[in-house]
Amino acid sequence: MKISKIFKDGIFIQNPILIQLIGLCSILAVTTSLINSFSMGLAVIFVAGMSNLVVSAIRKFIPNKIRIPIFIVVIATFVTVVQMVLEAYALPVYNALGIFIPLIVVNCLILGRAEGFAYNNKVFPSLMDGIANGLGYMLAAVIMGFIRELFGFGSLFGTQILPESVPKIGILTTPAGAFILLGFVTAIFKSIVNKKAA
């Protein structure tokens, strides 16, 4: 399988958030700011890539009946690494992301890629698939974070961009607003992807 196709699928054609609609909980919760969106995106890229790499490397030794628990243990190991690094070196980000860092363990995107791709493919393509799908997640998170922070708070990366006189769209700062926005972003993204495919 070509690496370029893996990246094209993971980021655009089969984007986990905007096309497959999996792993949405964290997108709706943490994308209130761009820094949170980037941080969560980087965490997902790392965990998805490394989990796919390890699952692919040990796939021939994993008994079929217990493969899912083994995948979860592998994923949990890398999530713990991310959690410890953020807590040690980026405490404000760690506090902002809160419970959604440990919940990466049960993110459908990461578990789905381990089961659907890494368990059936070689190590390098599996690593690339994890990174590509993590980048797809990050793309969606950054789009959502940009819109929500700019129009909901009037800032980007915590720096005030819009003047105080410009009215803010308060609903964008809530999970309900994020859900509505995600619907619009998904519709636009799917329309663009379908036009390019045609």
Image (spheres, rainbow, N blue to C red):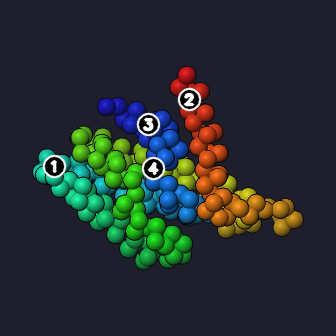
Element marked by disc 4: loop
Q: Is residue 26 above or below residue 97?
A: above
Q: Nearer the viewer, residue 86 or 112?
A: 112
User: Crowdedness of circle 3 by 10 Å Cα count: few (<14), some, many (20+)?
Assistant: some
What amino acid type should be assigned to the residue bearing mark 4?
A: Ile
How dense is the environment of label 2, judged by Cα within 10 Å: few (below 14), some, or many (20 and up)? few
Counting residues from the start of the chain, the first of labels 1 and 2 encountered is 1
Q: CA distance from mark 1 to mark 2?
A: 37 Å
- The first of marks 3 and 4 along the sequence is 3
Residue labelled with disc 2: 194
Residue at figure coordinates x 44%, y 76% from the top left: 87
Closer to the chain start, of discs 3 and 2, is 3
Q: Describe residue 117's horizontal placement relative to residue 63 as left or right.
A: right
Q: Amino acid at mark 3?
A: Asp
Label at residue 9 = 3
Left or right for 101, reference 65:
right
Residue named by callout 1: 64
Q: Hey, what amino acid is under mark 2?
A: Asn
Q: How far across and how far down the image is residue 100, in percent? A: 46, 67
Mark in the foreground, 2 or 4: 4
The residue beneath circle 4 is 22
In whole angstroms, how far apart are the C-alphas of marks 3 and 4?
15 Å
